[in-house]
Image (cartoon, rainbow, N blue to C red):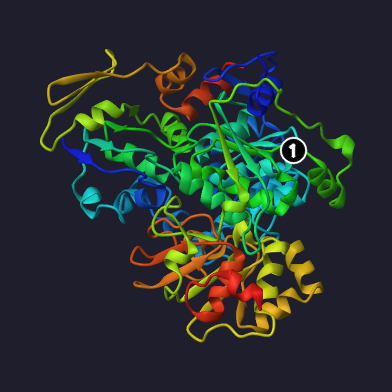
Amino acid sequence: MGMTFAEKILAKYSGGKNVVPGQIVTVCPDYLLTHDNTAAIIQKIKNELDEYGVYSKSLPVIVLDHVIPAASEKTASNHKIIREFVRSYGIENFFDVGTGVCHQVMIEEGLALPGKLLLGSDSHTCSYGAVGAFSSGIDRTEAASLLLTGETWLKVPNSIKIILRGKLKPGVFAKDVVLYIIGDISASGANYCSVEFHGDVEQFSVDDRFTMANMGVEMGAKNTVFLVDEVTTNYLDSIGVPRSAYKPVYPDEDASYMQELEYDLSDIVPVVACPHTVDNVKPITEVEGLEIQQCLIGTCNNGRLSDLKIAADILRGKKINRNIRLLILPASRKIYEEALREGIIESLVKSGGILLPPGCGPCLGAHQGVLAPGERCLSTANRNFKGRMGCKEAEIYLASPATVAASAIHGKITDPRREMKK
Amino acid sequence: MKVWRYGDNINTDMLFPGKYTYTCSTPEEIKPHLLEDLDPHFAKNASREDIILAGKNFGCGSSREQPVLGLKAVGVKAVIAESFARIFYRSAINQGLILIECPDAVKAYSEGDDVVLDMDAGKIIVGGKPFSFPKLPKEILAIRNAGGLLAYTRSKLKNK
């Protein structure tokens, strides 16, 4: 019997020839991602760090992105503790405030690569399947243990094959596709499973794949993956990763899947995930006209150059509605710089957008654009949980950058196809 | 012993709001905000040996571990749910919080029923009716028996 992507990776990393779903294996990941939570992680193991040191200086990747620049003395002190840890232990991969959202940094710095295994103390670590890596989220305690030992256990997951057929219609984007799928299979539809995307995926850029892989955890998946193809290798070429630096892993033809799902992309319309669960997905026609007060374009889900460009194309030469605050968050400094060069930032700002530094911004409700009771936000982020943006009496709706940009013009949820026709 | 009954998709923001993630990390800091946006009675009235019964996908969302640390600090005996989200499940193993996936036991519960847990026998008795749940794999039991992942890791480092 052949093996799925997850089975192949976990066999490779556990030194076994064959693994089967349900089996528990011990693995040493290539990288361990932590972010602002590194402060809490190292405080747990202060004595052990003094005694044993870190397992390896090249294992951790630390990115400050969650509350940046620091919003309080407490968060500033956390950042300081982390910088001191990086200095005293000689941690090789550290990215300070302003570099970008950790997941974007992992991919654009060429740390997440095809066939690699990465773990991170952030639920959206599953994003690196965008470039054919196996990646999954863990908690702080497990990250602490990994810092000391370099290894952990993983259960070999069952796999789900999602086959995408056909072509997307204009005005419909990767975000609509992944929200549509989550709406269909539910927020727990892929619990404990590895999700592989197959079919006509060459139309999806690495940016698009990132958006979809990033949402894997919102369907409960352990990891999500797009298998390496020309789109992947061209992207990695473009960021200067030599082809000798990675070896793609592919599932066998006769691999066994717990479930196979097929979607016709031409059936999908722009959608919105309504409060307060990501699987409460409705076609835009059902929610059009709903008044909103804040719009957010960015985060690790939709803050890439192509996302900002789609929004800028819709907003160029127009002003956003006077009742709207439009927050723009490039996912990294590199994206920010390129968007500046291409006039994308100018267009967004002239339309009324407010630029925030590359980071997580208001997505987790800690700062920068917290909502007030009774307000509604239309966001390109990946979660709409009650209280997520700092206020339990506010509502969060999730949609594509095109839908958010079109809606910012009108001050209410708007079908992006109306604005794109003009 | 009280039984707290909740529905499907109880996410990490309901269990512990994200706005406190980088300001509260000790059990004492976490406890007052536990389940703050879901059930304000919980933080005030929950006590040792209480049991949480929940629907599908309990603990979905963020990788933050404050929900598990908080429930453990309160002394919650177990969370019994129809299913759990995987990061939360791992996190509970790491902290030694007992999670039991047993949809039939959850569905059998009516308000006022006694819920008795017999870990050795792998049984939950709800309103007098027994339900079995499978034992954890030995690798996972080793972590729980060591008193959680950090204790397990410490002993591993010492024996190297």
Question: Left or right of B101: which side holds A19?
Answer: right
Pinpoint residue A32: horizontal percent, then vertical percent: 65, 38
Pinpoint residue A422: horizontal percent, then vertical percent: 66, 79
> Residue under mark 1: which chain is it in?
A
In the rendered image, which quarter is residue A31 located in?
top right
Pinpoint residue A314: horizontal percent, then vertical percent: 66, 75
Quadrant placement of the N terminus of chain A: top right
Q: Nearer the viewer, residue A286 or B56?
A: A286
Q: Nearer the viewer, residue A72 or A370?
A: A370
Pinpoint residue A56: horizontal percent, then vertical percent: 71, 33
Read off the residue under disc 1.
A58
Q: Is residue B62 visible?
A: no
- In the image, farthest residue toward the left: B112
Total numbered labels placed on residues in the image: 1
Residue displayed at 58% across by 17% down: A20
Residue displayed at 48% across by 55% down: A383
Q: Is residue A330 visible?
A: yes
Residue displayed at 52% across by 51% down: A180
Q: Nearer the viewer, residue A413 or A73?
A: A413
